[in-house]
Image: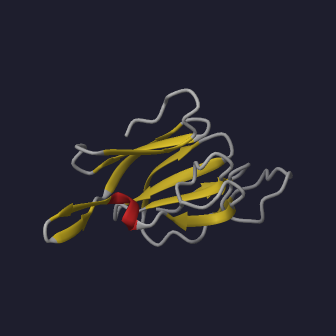
Amino acid sequence: SKLTCWQGQLGNEPISTSFRKDLKLVDGIKEHVVEIAAGYAFSVAVTSAGEVYTFGQNDRGQLGTGEDETALHATPVMIPAKYFKYEKHPKTYYYEIEHVCAGDNHVVVTTKDSKVMFSWGDNCTFFIIN
């Protein structure tokens, strides 16, 4: 599966104020994209391997990369697996993500077994559940 976008949070060129009217392939995601979501100025993709990629603005932490709010990513960045881990002594395991949804400036994902939910981004109006 290929991911194609055409405006705003494109994930395929330098961030600018211009609009793109033609389709352009989003490169940088190795696995098949199985689900996508878009917020106000960012996008999120989940792959068949349970990886999460984000791109666009991060002014409210909505990319989930742990970077400061000035970070902008014009191409997809994988959220490090360390953010989706749990420890069961003596090993560390990593959840595979299956579903994603996004609001204006926040993201919620669920694991493949639907037992765990992770969220990040803007919590100004009490949307984040942890």
Image quarter where the C terminus lies is: top left
Q: How many marks?
A: 0
Residue at the spot 54% in from the left edge and 41% down from the top edge? 106
- Could you tell me residue 63's position as x and y percent? 57, 54
Left or right of residue 21: residue 61: left
From the top left corner, tell me how far across and down residue 91 is, in percent. Answer: 17, 71
Q: Is residue 98 left or right of residue 119?
A: left
Q: Nearer the viewer, residue 2 or 10?
A: 10
Which of the 4 quarters of the picture holds residue 104?
top right
Residue placed at 34% from the left, 54% from the top? 97
Q: Quick one: 40 or 123, which is closer to the camera?
A: 123
**Whole-percent x, y for residue 112 in the image:** 26, 51
In the image, what residue occupies the spot 78% across and 59% down? Answer: 15
Q: Position of residue 57 (x, y in %)?
A: 68, 52
Colour option used: secondary structure
Residue that appears at 56% across and 27% down = 125
| Residue found at the very far right of the displayed protein | 18
The residue closer to the viewer here, 69 or 23, is 69
Q: In the rendered view, tell whether residue 38 sits above or below residue 71.
A: above
Left or right: residue 127 compared with residue 97: right
Q: Is residue 43 left or right of residue 50?
A: right
The single residue placed furthest to the top in the displayed view is: 125
Q: Residue furthest front?
A: 89
Observer-nearest of 88 and 53: 88
